[in-house]
Amino acid sequence: MAYKNDLWKDCFFYNKRGNSKLVIAFSHYDPNRKNRDIFSFYSLTQRKDLDVLFVRDCAGSWFFYPQGFENGLRAHYEMIKIIQEIAADYEQVLFLGNSMGGWGALYFGRLVPGAIVAGFASSLSIQEDFTQKYRPELLPCLKPLYETIKDHNRLTLENENWDLPKRIIFYEEINYGDKFNTAFQSGNFLKQNFLGTGHNLLYAFYKFGPFNELIDSFFDGDILDISSEIDEMRRKFGYTINMQGKEFIFNFSDPSSMLKMDVDIGFFISQKGTLLHTSYHKLTKSHIKNGKAVFDLPFPEEPYTIAAQIGVNKISLSEIGIPDFHKFVDTTQ
């Protein structure tokens, strides 16, 4: 692919196989910029039946690239043209994203006739206070774009004539900005919310849920029963914790499912406000005793406080409504 703007060399990856279906997957916002070289949902390249266009936001600016106001808009419209030209070669196109990527899916998806849109927890505008906190160097370029972007959101989401049913999926404990913007969505937009889930619900499906089945269901028009799948994930990855002597014990509802995953458990022991011990453990068969995961920890003399945190495949279980952080023992009270 040849681009007029050098930005696009780093912002697109086109996995072209000659299929009739295309997924256009948008990146989320990464305030730490640690994952700027990673395309979201990259494992879709393993699907031989799908072509995939990965789009990442190298500037962290909701896909509006700041080169000054006029130059930034020109770069943005070039990006629109690239996406439209690629999408025109396919029978079915799915725009997919979470958070800022969900906004990208909604915004660019409405520009491709007949496209399917799946926007999870869509952040529908640049928040100036958020940019001020994480990317203050962008503010001089982005300020002129704020009102432009707000107008795009209002006009395209409230008044656009959608030619096929689109779909936006968002979580229950949404922040005010997300809640305010979802109120604009009308026409044949289908909105769903899921009690107790988190901002990165789509990544929970991607990391340890039926992600491929979800993608297929969007193309087929018979959408996966997401609520039931969330309940099933909660069953598989549910747990309780307790102490017996000097042992810290996780009681997993389905240990075999846990052992198939990359499970990280962190322990934090403090005494009188001073952190004494931090350790991280990969869950293995050696930890499992009678269906329970048992950990021996170096407890200090009382009083002390111990906390534990658990993650599965590098994603928090809180995204599916399972608490992932526990202050388990606190004898300082």
Image (cartoon, helix red, strand yellow):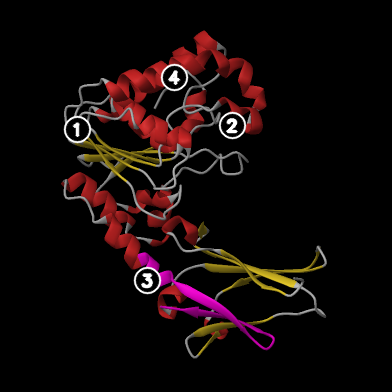
SS assignment at label 2: helix
Q: Earlier in the sequence, mark 1 or mark 2?
A: 2
Task: Give the class, few, some or many, for how many residues have Cα within 10 Å of label 4's Cα (few <14, many ≥20).
Answer: some
Residue at the disc numbered 2: 130
Q: Quadrant of the N terminus?
A: top left
What's under tag 4, amino acid-wise? Ile
Name the residue carrying label 4: 149
Q: Of the residues shown, which amino acid type is indicated by label 1? A: Asn
Task: Determine the CA span between mark 3 and mark 2.
Answer: 35 Å
CB contact under 8 Å: marks 3 and 1:
no
- The spot of residue 263 in percent (x, y) is 52, 69
Quadrant placement of the C terminus: bottom right
Which image quadrant is residue 17 in? top left
Residue 136 versus residue 174 in the image, above or below? above
Dot 3: what SS?
A: helix
Residue 36: image quadrant is top right
State left or right for residue 92 relative to residue 111. Answer: left
Mark 4 or mark 3, which is nearer the start of the sequence? Answer: 4
As measured in the structure, the alpha-carbon distance from the residue carrying label 3 to the one carrying label 1 is 33 Å
